[in-house]
């Protein structure tokens, strides 16, 4: 059920509707829009009688929602969600760029790369302190020591930190240090973890699972939002196919598909999506061309010595080239759209 308030509805009338929803044993999710507020309802197992709400002051209409997801869809919120993280906006007028090493390997390595990122005018720095690895013998990250190094990079270079949370056991620790909590592809359907980050008020970046459909992807985001955290960023990072020329198949078609169904911002990770350094910049260009709200890439000053995913990490000069090209492509698209309109 979706309750659409009238444009002139007062904050108190919105709260009165929310209170009625709570009294019925359900959970209200008010979503302010440009002209009116919509209130989603979760927790119901079946249809709700709309007459509970249609008579309330300030209510415009009560609409039944047929889709399996209620909060991520454009039925609830037509306007695009913009998530502000420090000086950066994800989903706004300009594409955001998130960059950094796959893993925090040492203090010196992290500071050198953070300086490159900050000098390029990029405000979001990625780096893994906890690493999910296919082999139990591969480098698993520095843990809290890595988080402390990331925090120092933030203080020193003025960047905000995007880092992965692996499980509910370490979620409190990651939340303490991170500006954005990342859910990796392997955890996209780790529902206890999704609920945990949904209880946080830190923004959450949700990566698409390796074989997830669009609906499964959106429903994973719904788990987070159903707990009350509406600051969700979707991330396409490639799916597993029969292709052997690339680590994963980067599905850029999901970007316009998400834009059609959801108000949430979506970015693209061409580093994990291809696994090959020479493919990252071309796919980053393509990501902006199809309408992605941003790019997340891996950068390393010495990728030949990287402890994790060296072959897909951009060298600093390549990263600067990518930033310039991505921004140029966005300007061309924006200018073309303004001429057409």
Image (cartoon, grey):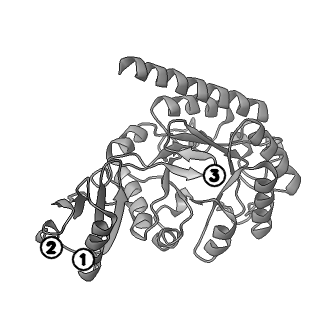
At label 3, counting other C-alpha atoms closer than 10 Å, the crowd grade (few under 14, some 14-19, many 20 or more) is few
Q: Residue furthest right?
A: 108
Q: Which mark is residue 52?
A: 2
- Above/below status of 308 relative to 64: above
Which residue lies at the image location 26% right of the left edge and 71% below the top edge? Answer: 17
Q: Earlier in the sequence, mark 2 or mark 1?
A: 1
Residue 22: horizontal and vertical position, in percent? 29, 79
Q: Return the x and y of residue 106 as percentages of the image width and height.
A: 85, 56
- Give the position of the C terminus as an image quadrant: top left
Q: Is residue 197 left or right of residue 19?
A: right
Q: Is residue 191 visible?
A: yes
In-front residue for pair 229/301:
229
Q: Where does label 1 land, which residue?
A: 20
Q: Residues within 10 Å of mark 1 (few under 14, many from 20)?
A: some
The residue tagged 3 is: 86
* Residue 24 location (% of width, % of height): 23, 80
- Between the residue at mark 2 and the residue at mark 1, the CA separation in whole angstroms equals 8 Å
Q: Regarding mark 1 in the picture, which secondary structure is present there?
A: helix
Label located before the other in sequence (3 or 2): 2
* Residue 182: % across, % down: 58, 59
Marks 3 and 2, how far apart at CA? 41 Å
* Between 5 and 222, the one nearer to me in the picture: 5
């Amino acid at each position: 059920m979706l309750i659409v308030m009238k444009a002139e509805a007062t904050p108190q009338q919105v709260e009165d509707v929310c209170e009625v929803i709570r009294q019925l044993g359900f959970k209200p999710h008010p979503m302010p829009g440009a002209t009116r507020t919509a209130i989603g309802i979760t927790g119901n197992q079946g249809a709700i009688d709309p007459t509970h709400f249609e008579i309330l002051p300030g209510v415009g209409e009560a609409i039944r929602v047929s889709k399996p997801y209620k909060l991520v869809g454009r039925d609830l919120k037509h306007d695009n969600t913009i998530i502000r993280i420090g000086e950066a906006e994800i989903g706004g007028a300009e594409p955001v760029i998130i960059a950094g090493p796959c893993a925090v390997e040492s203090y010196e390595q992290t500071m050198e790369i953070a300086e490159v990122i900050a000098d390029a005018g990029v405000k979001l720095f990625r780096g893994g302190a906890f690493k999910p690895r296919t082999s139990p013998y591969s480098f698993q990250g520095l843990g809290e020591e890595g988080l402390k190094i990331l925090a120092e990079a933030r203080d020193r270079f003025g960047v905000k930190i995007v880092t992965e949370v692996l499980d509910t056991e370490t979620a409190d620790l990651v939340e303490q240090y991170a500006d954005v909590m990342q859910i990796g592809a392997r955890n996209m359907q780790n529902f206890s973890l999704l609920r945990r980050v949904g209880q946080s008020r830190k923004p959450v970046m949700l990566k698409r699972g390796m074989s997830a459909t669009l609906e499964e992807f959106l429903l994973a985001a719904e788990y987070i939002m159903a707990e009350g955290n509406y600051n969700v960023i979707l991330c396409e990072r490639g799916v597993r196919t029969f292709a052997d020329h690339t680590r994963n198949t980067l599905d850029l078609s999901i970007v316009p598909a998400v834009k059609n169904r959801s108000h949430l911002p979506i970015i693209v990770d061409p580093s994990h999506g291809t696994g090959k350094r020479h493919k990252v910049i071309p796919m980053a260009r393509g990501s902006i061309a199809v309408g992605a709200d941003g790019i997340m890439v891996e950068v390393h000053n010495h990728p030949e010595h990287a402890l994790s995913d060296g072959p897909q990490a951009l060298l600093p000069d390549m990263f600067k080239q990518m930033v310039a090209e991505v921004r140029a492509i966005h300007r061309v698209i924006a200018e073309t759209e303004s001429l057409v309109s």
